Image (cartoon, rainbow, N blue to C red):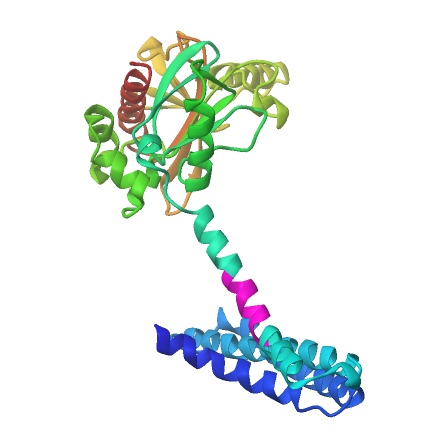
Protein backbone atom coordinates (compact mmCIF):
# COMPACT_ATOMS: atom_id res chain seq x y z
CA UNK A 1 0.00 0.00 0.00
CA UNK A 2 2.80 2.42 0.98
CA UNK A 3 4.76 1.50 -2.16
CA UNK A 4 1.72 2.24 -4.34
CA UNK A 5 1.22 5.66 -2.75
CA UNK A 6 4.94 6.42 -3.13
CA UNK A 7 4.66 5.68 -6.84
CA UNK A 8 2.03 8.39 -7.21
CA UNK A 9 4.37 10.90 -5.56
CA UNK A 10 6.84 10.65 -8.47
CA UNK A 11 4.84 12.78 -10.98
CA UNK A 12 3.92 15.21 -8.18
CA UNK A 13 7.58 15.77 -7.28
CA UNK A 14 8.68 15.93 -10.93
CA UNK A 15 6.18 18.64 -11.96
CA UNK A 16 6.74 20.57 -8.75
CA UNK A 17 10.51 20.61 -9.38
CA UNK A 18 10.09 21.60 -13.06
CA UNK A 19 7.91 24.57 -12.09
CA UNK A 20 10.56 25.74 -9.60
CA UNK A 21 13.15 25.77 -12.44
CA UNK A 22 11.30 28.43 -14.42
CA UNK A 23 13.53 31.54 -14.50
CA UNK A 24 10.88 34.23 -14.87
CA UNK A 25 7.17 35.05 -14.78
CA UNK A 26 6.61 34.68 -18.52
CA UNK A 27 8.32 31.30 -18.74
CA UNK A 28 6.37 30.17 -15.67
CA UNK A 29 3.06 31.27 -17.20
CA UNK A 30 3.85 29.57 -20.52
CA UNK A 31 4.91 26.38 -18.76
CA UNK A 32 1.75 26.39 -16.63
CA UNK A 33 -0.59 26.90 -19.59
CA UNK A 34 1.01 24.44 -22.02
CA UNK A 35 1.61 21.70 -19.45
CA UNK A 36 -1.72 22.25 -17.70
CA UNK A 37 -3.73 22.03 -20.93
CA UNK A 38 -1.91 18.87 -22.02
CA UNK A 39 -2.26 17.11 -18.68
CA UNK A 40 -5.87 18.29 -18.22
CA UNK A 41 -6.83 16.92 -21.65
CA UNK A 42 -5.26 13.56 -20.85
CA UNK A 43 -7.05 13.38 -17.48
CA UNK A 44 -10.39 14.32 -19.03
CA UNK A 45 -9.98 11.65 -21.71
CA UNK A 46 -8.93 9.06 -19.12
CA UNK A 47 -11.95 9.57 -16.86
CA UNK A 48 -14.28 9.70 -19.86
CA UNK A 49 -12.96 6.45 -21.33
CA UNK A 50 -12.44 4.39 -18.16
CA UNK A 51 -16.07 3.26 -17.88
CA UNK A 52 -16.33 2.08 -21.47
CA UNK A 53 -12.92 0.35 -21.67
CA UNK A 54 -13.18 -3.47 -22.03
CA UNK A 55 -12.08 -5.92 -19.35
CA UNK A 56 -9.25 -4.86 -17.08
CA UNK A 57 -8.30 -2.02 -19.42
CA UNK A 58 -10.70 0.28 -17.55
CA UNK A 59 -8.89 -0.21 -14.24
CA UNK A 60 -5.50 0.25 -15.93
CA UNK A 61 -6.76 3.45 -17.60
CA UNK A 62 -8.12 4.76 -14.30
CA UNK A 63 -4.81 4.13 -12.53
CA UNK A 64 -2.99 5.97 -15.30
CA UNK A 65 -5.42 8.87 -15.04
CA UNK A 66 -4.82 9.13 -11.29
CA UNK A 67 -1.10 9.20 -12.08
CA UNK A 68 -1.76 12.20 -14.36
CA UNK A 69 -3.87 13.86 -11.66
CA UNK A 70 -0.90 13.60 -9.31
CA UNK A 71 1.20 15.40 -11.93
CA UNK A 72 -1.46 18.13 -12.21
CA UNK A 73 -1.43 18.58 -8.44
CA UNK A 74 2.38 18.90 -8.51
CA UNK A 75 2.09 21.44 -11.32
CA UNK A 76 -0.40 23.57 -9.38
CA UNK A 77 1.68 23.46 -6.20
CA UNK A 78 4.93 24.19 -8.05
CA UNK A 79 3.52 27.09 -10.09
CA UNK A 80 1.96 28.66 -6.98
CA UNK A 81 5.23 28.29 -5.04
CA UNK A 82 7.42 29.66 -7.85
CA UNK A 83 5.05 32.56 -8.42
CA UNK A 84 5.29 33.47 -4.72
CA UNK A 85 9.10 33.34 -4.93
CA UNK A 86 9.17 35.56 -8.03
CA UNK A 87 6.71 38.01 -6.49
CA UNK A 88 8.89 38.59 -3.42
CA UNK A 89 11.61 41.24 -3.90
CA UNK A 90 15.06 39.73 -4.23
CA UNK A 91 16.36 41.94 -1.42
CA UNK A 92 13.97 40.19 1.02
CA UNK A 93 14.86 36.66 -0.06
CA UNK A 94 17.25 34.39 1.79
CA UNK A 95 18.07 30.73 1.62
CA UNK A 96 16.13 30.06 4.81
CA UNK A 97 13.04 31.92 3.63
CA UNK A 98 13.19 30.34 0.18
CA UNK A 99 13.59 26.85 1.66
CA UNK A 100 10.62 27.46 3.98
CA UNK A 101 8.49 28.71 1.08
CA UNK A 102 9.39 25.67 -1.07
CA UNK A 103 8.64 23.28 1.79
CA UNK A 104 5.32 24.99 2.54
CA UNK A 105 4.32 24.96 -1.11
CA UNK A 106 5.27 21.30 -1.50
CA UNK A 107 3.30 20.18 1.57
CA UNK A 108 0.28 22.49 1.32
CA UNK A 109 -1.76 20.48 -1.19
CA UNK A 110 -1.00 17.01 0.31
CA UNK A 111 -1.81 18.42 3.75
CA UNK A 112 -5.12 19.78 2.47
CA UNK A 113 -6.04 16.46 0.85
CA UNK A 114 -4.92 14.52 3.93
CA UNK A 115 -6.90 16.82 6.23
CA UNK A 116 -10.04 16.45 4.13
CA UNK A 117 -9.59 12.67 4.11
CA UNK A 118 -9.15 12.61 7.90
CA UNK A 119 -12.25 14.76 8.41
CA UNK A 120 -14.26 12.50 6.11
CA UNK A 121 -13.16 9.42 8.07
CA UNK A 122 -13.98 11.15 11.34
CA UNK A 123 -17.47 11.97 10.09
CA UNK A 124 -17.98 8.30 9.13
CA UNK A 125 -16.83 6.89 12.48
CA UNK A 126 -19.17 4.27 13.98
CA UNK A 127 -21.62 5.31 16.72
CA UNK A 128 -20.60 4.51 20.29
CA UNK A 129 -21.92 1.52 22.21
CA UNK A 130 -24.60 3.57 23.99
CA UNK A 131 -26.04 4.63 20.65
CA UNK A 132 -25.83 1.15 19.11
CA UNK A 133 -27.58 -0.41 22.12
CA UNK A 134 -30.32 2.24 22.34
CA UNK A 135 -34.02 1.77 21.70
CA UNK A 136 -35.52 5.00 20.42
CA UNK A 137 -39.05 5.90 21.48
CA UNK A 138 -40.85 7.60 18.57
CA UNK A 139 -44.45 8.39 17.72
CA UNK A 140 -46.18 8.45 14.33
CA UNK A 141 -49.77 9.72 14.16
CA UNK A 142 -50.09 9.08 17.90
CA UNK A 143 -48.80 5.49 17.75
CA UNK A 144 -45.74 4.55 19.80
CA UNK A 145 -42.79 2.70 18.28
CA UNK A 146 -39.49 1.56 19.79
CA UNK A 147 -36.70 1.46 17.21
CA UNK A 148 -33.35 -0.28 17.72
CA UNK A 149 -30.26 1.27 16.14
CA UNK A 150 -30.46 -0.91 13.04
CA UNK A 151 -29.46 0.30 9.54
CA UNK A 152 -32.90 -0.58 8.14
CA UNK A 153 -34.55 2.51 9.63
CA UNK A 154 -34.67 6.06 8.29
CA UNK A 155 -36.83 8.35 10.48
CA UNK A 156 -37.88 11.83 9.37
CA UNK A 157 -39.23 14.49 11.72
CA UNK A 158 -40.41 16.76 8.91
CA UNK A 159 -38.11 19.54 10.11
CA UNK A 160 -34.58 18.25 9.70
CA UNK A 161 -32.68 16.00 7.34
CA UNK A 162 -33.54 12.33 6.93
CA UNK A 163 -31.91 10.37 9.77
CA UNK A 164 -30.81 7.31 7.83
CA UNK A 165 -29.45 4.77 10.32
CA UNK A 166 -27.36 3.21 7.53
CA UNK A 167 -25.18 6.36 7.63
CA UNK A 168 -23.08 6.52 10.80
CA UNK A 169 -23.22 10.31 11.12
CA UNK A 170 -27.02 10.38 10.75
CA UNK A 171 -27.44 7.62 13.33
CA UNK A 172 -25.25 9.56 15.78
CA UNK A 173 -27.35 12.68 15.15
CA UNK A 174 -30.58 10.82 15.87
CA UNK A 175 -29.10 9.25 19.01
CA UNK A 176 -28.30 12.76 20.23
CA UNK A 177 -31.86 13.84 19.47
CA UNK A 178 -33.46 10.75 21.03
CA UNK A 179 -31.29 10.17 24.10
CA UNK A 180 -31.21 13.78 25.27
CA UNK A 181 -34.95 13.93 25.92
CA UNK A 182 -37.37 11.87 27.96
CA UNK A 183 -40.16 12.59 25.49
CA UNK A 184 -40.72 10.44 22.37
CA UNK A 185 -39.53 11.90 19.08
CA UNK A 186 -42.47 12.76 16.81
CA UNK A 187 -41.98 11.52 13.25
CA UNK A 188 -43.77 12.34 10.02
CA UNK A 189 -42.39 9.28 8.25
CA UNK A 190 -40.44 6.13 9.02
CA UNK A 191 -38.82 4.36 6.07
CA UNK A 192 -37.77 0.73 6.52
CA UNK A 193 -35.48 -1.06 4.07
CA UNK A 194 -34.63 -4.57 5.30
CA UNK A 195 -32.35 -5.08 2.27
CA UNK A 196 -29.69 -2.99 4.02
CA UNK A 197 -29.10 -5.86 6.45
CA UNK A 198 -27.46 -7.71 3.55
CA UNK A 199 -24.33 -5.54 3.87
CA UNK A 200 -22.26 -7.44 6.42
CA UNK A 201 -19.34 -5.77 8.14
CA UNK A 202 -21.07 -2.54 9.15
CA UNK A 203 -20.86 -2.07 12.94
CA UNK A 204 -24.54 -1.11 13.26
CA UNK A 205 -25.64 -4.11 11.20
CA UNK A 206 -23.41 -6.63 12.96
CA UNK A 207 -24.24 -5.19 16.39
CA UNK A 208 -27.98 -5.42 15.69
CA UNK A 209 -27.91 -8.96 14.28
CA UNK A 210 -25.88 -10.17 17.29
CA UNK A 211 -27.94 -8.18 19.79
CA UNK A 212 -30.26 -9.27 22.54
CA UNK A 213 -33.23 -8.03 20.53
CA UNK A 214 -33.74 -11.61 19.48
CA UNK A 215 -37.24 -11.39 18.05
CA UNK A 216 -36.48 -8.57 15.66
CA UNK A 217 -33.01 -9.83 14.72
CA UNK A 218 -34.40 -13.31 14.09
CA UNK A 219 -37.14 -11.80 11.93
CA UNK A 220 -34.94 -9.56 9.79
CA UNK A 221 -31.34 -10.82 9.68
CA UNK A 222 -31.55 -14.25 7.91
CA UNK A 223 -31.27 -13.76 4.14
CA UNK A 224 -33.92 -16.38 3.39
CA UNK A 225 -36.41 -14.51 5.59
CA UNK A 226 -35.66 -11.07 4.09
CA UNK A 227 -36.63 -12.43 0.67
CA UNK A 228 -40.26 -12.56 1.87
CA UNK A 229 -40.32 -8.98 3.16
CA UNK A 230 -41.52 -5.83 1.44
CA UNK A 231 -38.69 -4.16 -0.47
CA UNK A 232 -39.57 -0.71 0.83
CA UNK A 233 -41.86 0.27 3.70
CA UNK A 234 -43.11 3.72 4.69
CA UNK A 235 -45.09 4.21 7.88
CA UNK A 236 -46.30 7.79 8.00
CA UNK A 237 -48.77 10.25 9.41
CA UNK A 238 -51.89 10.61 7.20
CA UNK A 239 -52.32 14.31 7.88
CA UNK A 240 -52.26 17.48 5.80
CA UNK A 241 -48.55 17.70 6.65
CA UNK A 242 -47.85 14.23 5.35
CA UNK A 243 -44.72 14.19 3.19
CA UNK A 244 -46.57 12.34 0.43
CA UNK A 245 -49.11 15.15 0.17
CA UNK A 246 -46.28 17.68 0.00
CA UNK A 247 -44.91 15.76 -2.96
CA UNK A 248 -48.34 15.96 -4.62
CA UNK A 249 -49.30 12.30 -4.28
CA UNK A 250 -52.34 10.89 -2.56
CA UNK A 251 -52.48 9.33 0.88
CA UNK A 252 -56.02 8.01 0.45
CA UNK A 253 -55.07 4.33 0.22
CA UNK A 254 -54.95 1.78 -2.59
CA UNK A 255 -58.58 0.63 -2.33
CA UNK A 256 -59.98 4.17 -2.35
CA UNK A 257 -57.81 5.00 -5.36
CA UNK A 258 -59.09 1.87 -7.13
CA UNK A 259 -62.75 2.71 -6.42
CA UNK A 260 -62.21 6.24 -7.71
CA UNK A 261 -60.71 4.98 -10.99
CA UNK A 262 -63.37 2.28 -11.34
CA UNK A 263 -66.23 4.77 -10.86
CA UNK A 264 -64.64 7.18 -13.33
CA UNK A 265 -64.36 4.41 -15.95
CA UNK A 266 -68.05 3.52 -15.48
CA UNK A 267 -69.04 7.18 -15.69
CA UNK A 268 -67.28 7.52 -19.05
CA UNK A 269 -68.92 4.33 -20.35
CA UNK A 270 -65.68 2.30 -20.37
CA UNK A 271 -65.91 -0.13 -17.42
CA UNK A 272 -62.65 -1.84 -16.51
CA UNK A 273 -62.02 -5.34 -17.79
CA UNK A 274 -61.56 -7.85 -15.00
CA UNK A 275 -60.29 -11.42 -14.75
CA UNK A 276 -60.05 -13.84 -11.83
CA UNK A 277 -56.52 -14.53 -10.58
CA UNK A 278 -56.57 -16.82 -7.56
CA UNK A 279 -58.02 -14.95 -4.59
CA UNK A 280 -57.93 -11.67 -6.54
CA UNK A 281 -59.81 -9.92 -9.29
CA UNK A 282 -57.24 -8.51 -11.70
CA UNK A 283 -58.35 -5.28 -13.39
CA UNK A 284 -57.07 -3.84 -16.65
CA UNK A 285 -55.73 -0.69 -14.96
CA UNK A 286 -53.26 -2.70 -12.86
CA UNK A 287 -55.28 -3.15 -9.66
CA UNK A 288 -55.60 -6.51 -7.94
CA UNK A 289 -58.51 -6.62 -5.45
CA UNK A 290 -59.26 -9.49 -3.06
CA UNK A 291 -62.47 -11.27 -4.15
CA UNK A 292 -65.66 -11.86 -2.16
CA UNK A 293 -64.36 -10.39 1.08
CA UNK A 294 -61.75 -13.17 1.34
CA UNK A 295 -59.07 -10.81 2.66
CA UNK A 296 -59.32 -7.39 4.30
CA UNK A 297 -56.62 -5.00 5.43
CA UNK A 298 -56.61 -3.26 8.82
CA UNK A 299 -58.86 -0.51 7.46
CA UNK A 300 -61.52 -3.22 6.83
CA UNK A 301 -61.19 -2.71 3.07
CA UNK A 302 -60.70 -5.50 0.52
CA UNK A 303 -56.94 -5.97 0.28
CA UNK A 304 -55.87 -4.05 -2.84
CA UNK A 305 -52.63 -4.01 -4.80
CA UNK A 306 -51.46 -1.95 -7.73
CA UNK A 307 -49.04 -3.89 -9.97
CA UNK A 308 -47.09 -3.23 -13.13
CA UNK A 309 -44.88 -5.39 -15.33
CA UNK A 310 -41.14 -5.53 -14.79
CA UNK A 311 -38.38 -7.69 -16.25
CA UNK A 312 -38.00 -10.59 -16.61
CA UNK A 313 -41.23 -11.46 -18.36
CA UNK A 314 -44.06 -12.49 -16.07
CA UNK A 315 -42.74 -10.58 -13.04
CA UNK A 316 -44.74 -7.82 -11.38
CA UNK A 317 -43.88 -4.97 -9.03
CA UNK A 318 -46.81 -4.54 -6.62
CA UNK A 319 -47.55 -1.94 -3.96
CA UNK A 320 -50.31 -1.26 -1.46
CA UNK A 321 -51.29 1.58 0.87
CA UNK A 322 -53.73 1.35 3.78
CA UNK A 323 -54.46 2.77 7.22
CA UNK A 324 -53.26 0.83 10.25
CA UNK A 325 -55.82 0.38 13.01
CA UNK A 326 -53.73 2.33 15.55
CA UNK A 327 -53.40 5.46 13.39
CA UNK A 328 -50.50 5.61 10.92
CA UNK A 329 -50.76 4.88 7.23
CA UNK A 330 -48.46 2.34 5.56
CA UNK A 331 -47.19 1.89 2.03
CA UNK A 332 -44.99 -0.97 0.91
CA UNK A 333 -43.99 -2.78 -2.26
CA UNK A 334 -42.71 -6.20 -3.33
CA UNK A 335 -41.98 -8.24 -6.46
CA UNK A 336 -43.65 -11.50 -7.45
CA UNK A 337 -44.44 -13.64 -10.47
CA UNK A 338 -47.93 -12.98 -11.80
CA UNK A 339 -48.94 -16.56 -10.96
CA UNK A 340 -47.80 -16.16 -7.34
CA UNK A 341 -49.08 -12.68 -6.49
CA UNK A 342 -51.78 -13.90 -4.07
CA UNK A 343 -49.50 -16.18 -2.02
CA UNK A 344 -46.61 -13.67 -2.09
CA UNK A 345 -48.89 -10.84 -0.94
CA UNK A 346 -50.15 -12.85 2.04
CA UNK A 347 -46.62 -13.84 3.10
CA UNK A 348 -45.28 -10.30 2.70
CA UNK A 349 -48.16 -8.73 4.62
CA UNK A 350 -47.89 -11.31 7.40
CA UNK A 351 -44.19 -10.50 7.78
CA UNK A 352 -44.96 -6.79 7.79
CA UNK A 353 -47.56 -7.27 10.52
CA UNK A 354 -45.06 -9.29 12.56
CA UNK A 355 -42.55 -6.43 12.22
CA UNK A 356 -45.15 -3.90 13.39
CA UNK A 357 -46.04 -6.01 16.43
CA UNK A 358 -42.39 -6.10 17.51
CA UNK A 359 -41.75 -2.39 16.91
CA UNK A 360 -44.84 -1.35 18.88
CA UNK A 361 -43.88 -3.55 21.83
CA UNK A 362 -41.87 -1.71 24.47
The residue positioned 71% from the left and 83% from the top of the image is 32
Q: Quadrant of the C terminus?
A: top left
Q: In this view, does 357 lie to the left or right of 24?
A: left
Q: Position of residue 270 (x, y in %)?
A: 58, 21
For residue 348, above or below residue 337: above
What is the magenta segment's predominant secondary structure? helix
The residue positioned 62% from the left and 74% from the top of the image is 105
Instruction: Find residue 18 and report its image quarter.
Output: bottom right
For residue 327, above or below residue 265: above
For residue 314, above or below residue 39: above
Q: In this view, does 34 lie to the left or right of 77?
A: right
Identify which residue, 337 or 105, lies in the foreground: 105
Q: Where is residue 262 in the image (x, y as percent from the top left)?
A: 54, 17
> What residue range appears in magenta?
106-114
Q: In this view, does 50 lie to the left or right of 144?
A: right
The residue positioned 51% from the left and 16% from the top of the image is 237
Q: Position of residue 211 (x, y in %)?
A: 22, 31
Identify which residue, 251 or 271, lies in the foreground: 251
Look at the image and tell me whether residue 301 can be seen.
yes
Q: In this view, does 205 lie to the left or right of 320?
A: left
Instruction: Find residue 203 and report its image quarter.
Output: top left
Q: Is residue 17 magenta?
A: no
For residue 85, above or below residue 21: above
Identify which residue, 284 or 139, lies in the foreground: 139
Number of numbered discs: 0
Q: Where is residue 50 in the image (x, y as percent from the top left)?
A: 49, 72
Q: Is residue 112 magenta?
A: yes
Q: Quadrant of the N terminus?
A: bottom left
Look at the image and tell me whether residue 283 can be seen.
no
Amino acid sequence: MVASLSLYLIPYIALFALALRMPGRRSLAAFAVVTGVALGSLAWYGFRSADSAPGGAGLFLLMGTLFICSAIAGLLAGVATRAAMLWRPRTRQSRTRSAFLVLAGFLALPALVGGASWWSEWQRRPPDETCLAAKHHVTIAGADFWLPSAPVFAPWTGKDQLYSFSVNRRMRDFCSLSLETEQPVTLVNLSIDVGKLGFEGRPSRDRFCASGDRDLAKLLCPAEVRADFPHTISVYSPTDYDYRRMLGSSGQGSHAAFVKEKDAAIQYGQPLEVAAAGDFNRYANGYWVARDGMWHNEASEPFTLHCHDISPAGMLHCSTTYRLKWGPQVSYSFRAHQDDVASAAKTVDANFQALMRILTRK
